């Protein structure tokens, strides 16, 4: 996986409780549709909760991160198929 640290725009569906599911995101002037969320986990950084999502667009794997305190999304890793 290639490590990246870029803020991105993400469309999400918020469910009951603390359920969050990314639907699509923009990166590099391109829109990626999330076909599958393969894994999710959360961590604490002080008082802040950070949600991690491993997602696929059907060809590539991405790691998206949501910071609850700042309400910002970032793309942190990409495994792109040639």
Image (tube, helix red, strand yellow):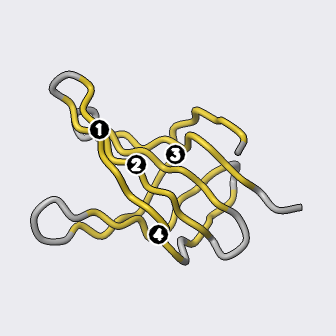
Which one is earlier in the sequence, the residue at label 1 or at label 4?
4
Residue at which label 4 appears: 37
- Contact between marks 4 and 2 (CB within 8 A): the answer is no
Residue at which label 1 appears: 43
- Residue at 44% across, 55% down: 53
- Contact between marks 1 and 4 (CB within 8 A): the answer is no
Specify few, some or many for label 4: CA neighbours under 10 Å numbering under 14, 14-19, or 20 or more: some
Specify few, some or many for label 3: CA neighbours under 10 Å numbering under 14, 14-19, or 20 or more: some
Please give left or right for residue 46 compared with residue 6 in the image: left
Depth check: give the residue in front, 11 or 79. Answer: 79
Horizontal and vertical percent for residue 22?
A: 41, 65
Which one is earlier in the sequence, the residue at label 4 or at label 2?
4
- Contact between marks 2 and 3 (CB within 8 A): the answer is no
* Quadrant where the image shows the C terminus: bottom right
Depth check: give the residue in front, 2 or 25. Answer: 2
Depth check: give the residue in front, 50 or 11. Answer: 50
Which one is earlier in the sequence, the residue at label 2 or at label 1?
1
Horizontal and vertical percent for residue 14?
A: 23, 67
Please, what secondary structure does the residue beneath circle 3 have? strand
Please, what secondary structure does the residue beneath circle 1 have? strand
Q: Quadrant of residue 13?
A: bottom left
């Amino acid at each position: 996986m290639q490590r990246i640290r870029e803020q991105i725009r993400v469309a999400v569906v918020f469910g009951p409780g603390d359920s969050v599911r990314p639907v699509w995101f923009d990166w590099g002037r391109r829109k990626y549709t999330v076909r599958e969320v393969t894994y999710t986990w959360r961590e604490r950084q002080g008082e802040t909760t950070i949600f991690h999502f491993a997602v696929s667009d059907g060809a590539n794997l991405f790691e998206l991160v949501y910071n609850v305190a700042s309400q910002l999304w970032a793309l942190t890793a990409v495994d792109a198929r040639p």
